[in-house]
Amino acid sequence: MAELVLNHVYKDYKLENKSKFTALTDINLSFEKGELVSIIGESGSGKSTLMNLIGGLDSDYTGEIKIDGADLKSFKDKQLDDYRKKKIGFVFQSFNLIPHLSVIDNVTIALTLSNVKESVKRERAMELLTKLGLKDHAKKKPTQLSGGQKQRVAIARALINNPDIILADEPTGALDSETTLQILDILKSIADNENKLVIMVTHSEKVAKISSRIVEISDGKVIHDEQKSDYIKSEKKEKLLACYDIESKDLNNSKKKKEGHLSIFSALKLSFQNMWASKTKNILMAVGVSISLIALILMLSLGSGLTGYIDSLAQDYSNPNYVTISKSGYDRDGNELEDNGNFMVPRMFEDEEIEEVASDINSYLQTEGSDFQIITSGEGQNLTYGFSCPTIGIGTSTISTIPAVDEETELPEEVKTENIMYAYTTPPYYTEDNLIAGSMSGDGEIMLSSAVIDFLGYKTAEEMFANDNKPTVQLYINMTYDGVRIEINKTVQISGIVDVSVFSGMMVMYLDYDFLDACVMEAQENVDVEPTGLSPSLLFIETDGKNTTDMINYYIDTYRRDLSGSIEEQLASMFSEMMSTFSIALAIISGISLFVALIMILVVLYMSVSERTKEIGVLKSIGARKKDIKMIFSTESLLIGLLSGIVGILLTLIIGAILIGVFTALIGFAPLSMNWYYFAIALLISIVISVIAGVYPASKAAKLDPVESLRRE
Ligand code: ADP
Ligand code: MG
């Protein structure tokens, strides 16, 4: 029985306008083992078309092609892949070696697709390469070889699976006459010594002459078929594929075993080799993708950093048993008051306003069924006064505060105006627990934040109060109060240092309300004004617990737009407002950039598929399944995701460290809390978007028509 038989084979190419072009007409041929067949004919006569049909690359024909009696038409996809992998070896005119793989990896690629053990692959490949005179070139890349060497590598690749049929489409077309002879010698020996069927397409008369049979095709028809009676077999040489004779039994056995396929490990290795070949492109892309990951990690870190910061603010400054009320700078309808822009002016409560606020809240509490009532004076009084104002100026020998400065205010020479200071009357819930050192202030005393320690020439807070000493400073207040200029100039003692936690970089002064009240009264007397004393800018309500505190705060927030919580609470709400705007902005930015990253990966992979069309064609001609091609491209997108993730993490660590340094230097703390799981999330997202981006290019690659891919120049 003949090895390969073609009966009435017709091949039509469908053209765009629904017409067709008949490339092969009624081909009837029969080939035996050991034949060296030359197919000759003019360009466009249908030689390559015939080779593609025989090679199982093109199944769109009519008629019969029989291999060892089995009809190729009846083969399922899987059998056809196997047929290409095991039965056929392709050799092309333009070599079609995979450029980023070494010689040995090119030769073993068909075995890789069958998941053959590494040591077996190497052994077989080295044996072939040695016999083809390429022993010393195994580690080279194809670009480092001459044309003849490349074609010998291609022949080794075609032979690695010990196929029965070698199809060579113009194998010497790109070679000079000397190397042409070398290659012909090898092909001839494959036919003569290994008893294989070698079919080669050629233009050259000389090449055709050395073959055992010449088939001439013209316009898709066989016009001449001649067996050469004067064919001289080449001398018996050592077999190229000696290793297969010993193993042939094993090979038969392995057919019964489950067939090996491209392993994920090999696919990863192939992808890695391809990515390595275009390192710069891939690293640049990874940097591009990583920008979105950096935005994502920083967004999450900033979110939790600020939340933590606000929590600490709230914990440090609010007491669940107290409501702090100040004027908001708006009226009850939410219209801005005239002086709202000037934060230097304390907004003070008149006595009637205090009563109004108290009774308004009391009636709300009553309707809500609460037992708690605000008592503004007398027995059970639970409303106390406070005063707060930004002030400027602190001198080395004097502590001077100037609330409500206007243009006329002249500062004493020793006052440094670049230091902004905040002055508070001590909140009623402050205790020794709020102090770093010293004791609570009384009459003639003030407390300061730790930023002042260094300023006054001390190293530590403890040092300031060593041996029960209390340093004295000059308290200098020069302000326009109720339209009248008053001046306070008093020697006071520093009684303690207050822990202002996150504000530790700011200079803050605390003093007793009664003491400040007495100072103002004295100053008013000095300028012959009726001594009214201090009016409060803060009201503290001591409640019966957190529930009532929350109820009152809720009422103020919702119904009293003219009032607001303490400065600290305002700060906290300002921060959380800022943070939510900021995180929404960052979420949008990182969302968009993740999408851009996805598109970018998709484009790069898509381009990679176009660039590697030929390689895909070669892999298919070697017997790669659609699945294998898909796996190679999917693993590549996985690796891109991994690489981008790692680059993103590294860059975030660097940028994060810089940001923390800058924030700490500027505001004394860094609102960034970088948790390890943010990095894990970013890595995961990076891998997920890359894999998603890879789905389309990978399936496009898998669907490529091998015949078209190979025709591509
Ligand atoms: P050869 O290898 O002998 O030079 P081919 O087998 O490549 O010729 O092509 C035979 C004929 O079929 C040519 O006329 C060519 O233009 C035509 N042909 C090849 N491939 C296609 C195709 N995909 N679509 C339409 N026509 C094709
Ligand atoms: Mg051709």
Image (cartoon, rainbow, N blue to C red):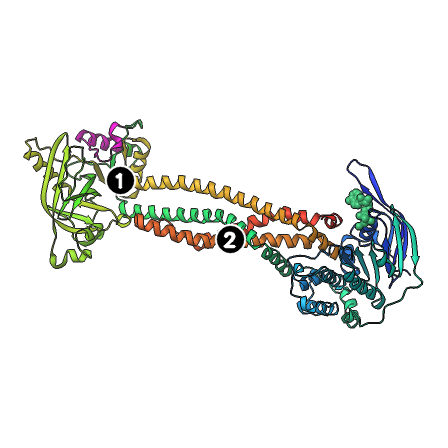
- The magenta-colored residue range is 337-362
Q: Is residue 204 above or below residue 560?
A: below
In the image: residue 555, left or right of residue 418: right
Q: Is residue 580 magenta?
A: no
Q: Is residue 349 magenta?
A: yes
Q: Is residue 443 above or below residue 79?
A: above
Q: CA distance from mark 2 to mark 1?
A: 43 Å
Amino acid type of the residue tagged 1 in the rendering: Ile
Picture residue at 70% right of the left edge, 57% below the top: 97
Residue 211 or 660: which is nearer the viewer? 211
Residue 274 or 261: which is nearer the viewer? 274
Ligand 1 contact, mark 2 (Cβ < 8 Å): no
In the image: residue 502, left or right of residue 219: left
Tell me if label 2 and label 1 are in contact, CB under 8 Å.
no
Quarter of the image for residue 270 reads bottom right
Query: What residue is disc 1 on?
Result: 567
User: How far from the left and from the top, in percent, is residue 524?
Assistant: 8, 34
User: How far from the left and from the top, in percent, is residue 554?
Assistant: 32, 36
Picture residue at 72% right of the left edge, 62% below the top: 149
Secondary structure of residue under mark 2: helix
Q: Is residue 437 visible?
A: yes
- Could you tell me what secondary structure mostly forms the magenta stretch? helix
Which of the labelled discs sits on residue 645, or is there none?
2
Check disc 1: other Cα within 10 Å, few if <14, some if 14-19, many if 20+: some
Q: How many marks?
A: 2
Q: Is residue 31 visible?
A: no
User: How far from the left and from the top, in percent, is residue 571?
Assistant: 30, 41
User: How far from the left and from the top, in percent, is residue 507?
Assistant: 22, 46
Amino acid type of the residue tagged 2 in the rendering: Gly
Which quadrant of the rendered structure holds the N terminus? bottom right
Residue 74 or 515: which is nearer the viewer? 74
Check disc 2: other Cα within 10 Å, few if <14, some if 14-19, many if 20+: many
